[in-house]
Amino acid sequence: MKAWVTGGAGFLGSHVTEALAGAGHDVTVVDDFSTGLTENLLGVAARVERHSLLDAAVETLLAKDRPEVIFHLAGDALVARSVADPRGDCERNLLATLALLEAVRRVSPESKLLFASTGAVYGERAERPFQETDSVWPISPYGVAKLAAERYCFAYAHTYGLRTCSLRLFSVYGPRQTKQVVFDLIRKLHANPDELAMFGDGTQERDFSHSKNIVDAFLLAAKSADFRGEVFNVAGDEIVSIRGLAEMLCEIMGANPKLLFTGQRRPGDSQRWVAETTRLRGLGYRPQVKLRDGLRDTIEWYVRSGK
């Protein structure tokens, strides 16, 4: 298979790239390296094109390559950054996606486009896990931009006949991630095993997914989804509170700190962010990496990397 991975030098994109190249596929990474790192692709057999998706050169490359599947993981996944710079977030997450869709429409309409969306599109309703058929009311600029990009993927499928599909990712963690709650807690515990400060009151709930599980979801969807603009939730099957996550990390790292909670809620964050994944499981998806094993794997990477 000939595949493109946009954002392929980033945290999650590099894992997708590595898996595809390891399986013998012909892989091209398209990344502007605004956040991606060359070290994430060391030893990976992939061609690298340093471009923003807003560059006209991307369409020229696409016309030449005409990949079978485009794994679109370029963009920004930081809610806090979207709150501080909503216009920039719109450019990175929405306008870049629209530019890619237009390029596909013009020069490679047979390519499948698999878009990395987010569970943040749902907003903050908390009474039950989110389903793909639920109404969507994102509360952060990041969620708004991702939802609009999703809608464009759907519209291009139904208006122009493009082959698109979106995966709504929930809390992702793993090696190479240098932001978000799991990394942040590991970093804090490593720096000070006697005291651990956290936002909120510890009752916030999340449905964490190790990067390998997410890669499996992308590869499965690329092979088995209909690509008619549909969406799939992607999450783990172990719901945990932030306090429970912190306690699990402390146990694995052999730390016994005093847990401190600020009581403050960060703008754009949901209190309970968990998903129903029946639709994806219908394709055969089963998370293989359990939370405790995934946290141990991430801690080992953190220590090795010297982050």
Image (cartoon, rainbow, N blue to C red):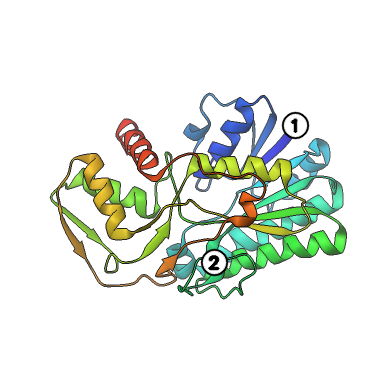
Q: Quadrant of residue 204?
A: bottom left
* Front residue of this view, candidates 288 and 78: 288
In the drawing, does residue 180 fall left or right of residue 37?
A: left
**Residue type highlighted by circle 2:** Phe
Q: Quadrant of residue 217?
A: top right
The residue beneath circle 2 is 130
> How many other residues sit within 10 Å of disc 2, few (<14), some (14-19) or many (≥20)?
many
> How many other residues sit within 10 Å of disc 1, few (<14), some (14-19) or many (≥20)?
few
Image coords of residue 37 (percent x, y): 49, 39
Image coords of residue 80 (percent x, y): 43, 64
Image coords of residue 221 (percent x, y): 68, 46
Q: Is residue 164 above or below residue 134?
A: above
For mark 1, give the secondary structure: loop
Q: Residue at x 40, y 72 (%)?
A: 267
The residue beneath circle 1 is 1
CA separation in Å, label 1 and label 2: 33 Å
For the question of whether residue 289 can be seen, the reply is yes
